[in-house]
Amino acid sequence: MRIAARLERIADGIERLTTAIGRAAAWCALAIVLMVFAVVLMRYVLGLGSIWLTEAILYAHAALFLLAAAWTLKEGAHVRVDVFFAGASPRRRALIDLIGAALLLAPFVAALTWFALPYAGRSIAILERSREASGLPLVFLLKSLIPAFALLLGLQGIAQAIRAALTLAGKSA
């Protein structure tokens, strides 16, 4: 098998993974809406509050953004400087994507991983819980989303760089 075909299969596999995780995380938006509705209903109609439900909203919001970020990058829905990208040819777009992945995304992912792994690791080691007595006992899972975000974003950056390199080499798009 040609190396270009192998690289394209790797990029396809990464993109299937980030798409699947992103689509699953997108369901958190519905969960957030339903939980916020429940909190408002409980507070203003029943006069009750719920710390665990409020924390669950925070967790779902974090999961939505951290787990869907790589999918957003794949779909091109992220923030980018369109002044350089909008009217560019496919080769120029590929060059911008390759430079962006190598000089901007890779160092960000490396720094994030460097700081997030010990942070999440300490939380996992003690099975960190909410500071609130009736809060969720899952703070360690929330903090674990940060290295997961770095991993997924790094993988999608690799797929983006592969596709850009193949385009520049005239092998594929």
Image (cartoon, rainbow, N blue to C red):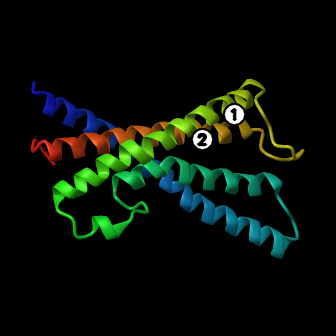
Residue 68 position, x and y percent, is 47, 51
Tell me: 155 left or right of 49: left
Considering every residue shown, the one lying at the far bottom of the view is 44
Residue 4 position, x and y percent, is 14, 33
Find the distance from the CA under tag 2 to the CA under tag 1. 9 Å
Which residue is at a point 48% across and 40% down the rendered structure image? 107
Q: Secondary structure at mark 2?
A: helix
Number of other residues with Cα within 10 Å of mark 1, as a class: few under 14, some 14 to 19, many 20 or more: some
- Earlier residue among tags 2 and 1: 1
Which residue is at a point 48% across and 55% down the rendered structure image? 26
Query: Residue 152 or 154: which is nearer the viewer?
Result: 154
Figure check: 160 above or below 46:
above
Q: Secondary structure at mark 1?
A: helix
Tell me: 111 left or right of 124: left
Which residue is at a point 17% across and 58% down the rendered structure image? 90
* Residue on which the image places disc 2: 146
* Residue on which the image places disc 1: 119
Residue 138 position, x and y percent, is 73, 39
Tell me: 90 left or right of 43: left
Tell me: 105 left or right of 95: right
Badge 2 vs badge 1, beta-carbon distance below 8 Å: yes
Where, by quadrant of the figure, is residue 157 drawn?
top left
Where, by quadrant of the figure, is residue 11 drawn?
top left
- Which amino acid type is marked by label 1? Tyr
Figure check: 7 above or below 83:
above
Which quarter of the rendering shows the N terminus?
top left
- Which amino acid type is marked by label 2? Ile
